[in-house]
Amino acid sequence: MKKNNIIYIAGGARSGKSGYALTLASSYQNKIYIATAEACDNEMKQRIELHKAQRDKSYLTIEEPYRLGPVLLNIQEQYDVVIIDCLTLWLSNLFVKDEKERAFEIDFFLKSLCSFSKPLIIISNELGMGIVPENKIARQFRDEMGTLNQKTAQKSGEAYFMVSGLPLKIK
């Protein structure tokens, strides 16, 4: 990896982002997977179980739906590679918080990336390629996700866009 050890992977739903992240991390020994999803219904529980089944037993998994920044700071020197899956669900979780708290968590996360010295693979969905959402909250989410994606990609040393299971290197 380059001097900047952050790899950013974006793409649409079911585009192969998580599988590609696992491939990139496969050669490392001491691996951690930070899952941001919350099992709020049966369908989401099934999705989480599918993601768990894709990972081998060499991963330690931390489920963290809100406080990514503090988790990164606490684990940064303990693992050979870290995967965050995914920023989209994390931001969705933060939308239940008030705007100031959400902004604080996002800022803390982005600042924590600056001090991260180990390989860090960050997965996110690209939401800005579809139709403009009909309602205000959906437009606000799309806009905030776009801003978070841009800021994360700018901090990365490498960036990929996944299309039909194929990685397109964009940085």
Image (cartoon, helix red, strand yellow):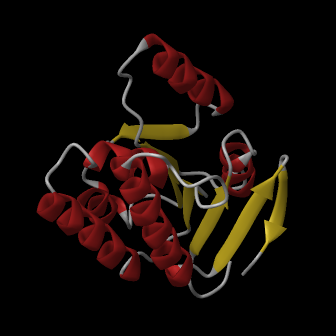
- Relative to 12, 30 lies left or right: left
Residue 151 horizontal/vertical position (percent): 46, 78
* In the foreground, 126 or 29: 126
- Quarter occupied by the N terminus: bottom right
Q: Position of residue 128 (x, y in %)?
A: 59, 61
Residues 110 and 119: in front is 110
Q: Position of residue 5 (x, y in %)?
A: 57, 77
Residue 81 occupies which quadrant of the picture? bottom right
Q: Residue shown at 23%/60% (left/top)?
A: 70
Looking at the image, residue 142 sits to the left or right of residue 129; the answer is: left
The residue shown at (36%, 80%) is 115
Residue drawn at 61 percent across, 51 percent down: 29
Q: Is residue 6 left or right of residue 23?
A: left
Q: Which one is in front, 139 or 100?
A: 139
The C terminus: image quadrant:
bottom right
- Residue at image position (14%, 59%) is 101
Query: Looking at this rendering, what residue extends furthest in the bottom direction?
Result: 3
The number of discs equals 0
Outermost residue on the front side: it is 134
Query: Looking at the picture, does residue 3 appear above or below residue 87?
Result: below
**Residue 129: % across, % down:** 67, 59
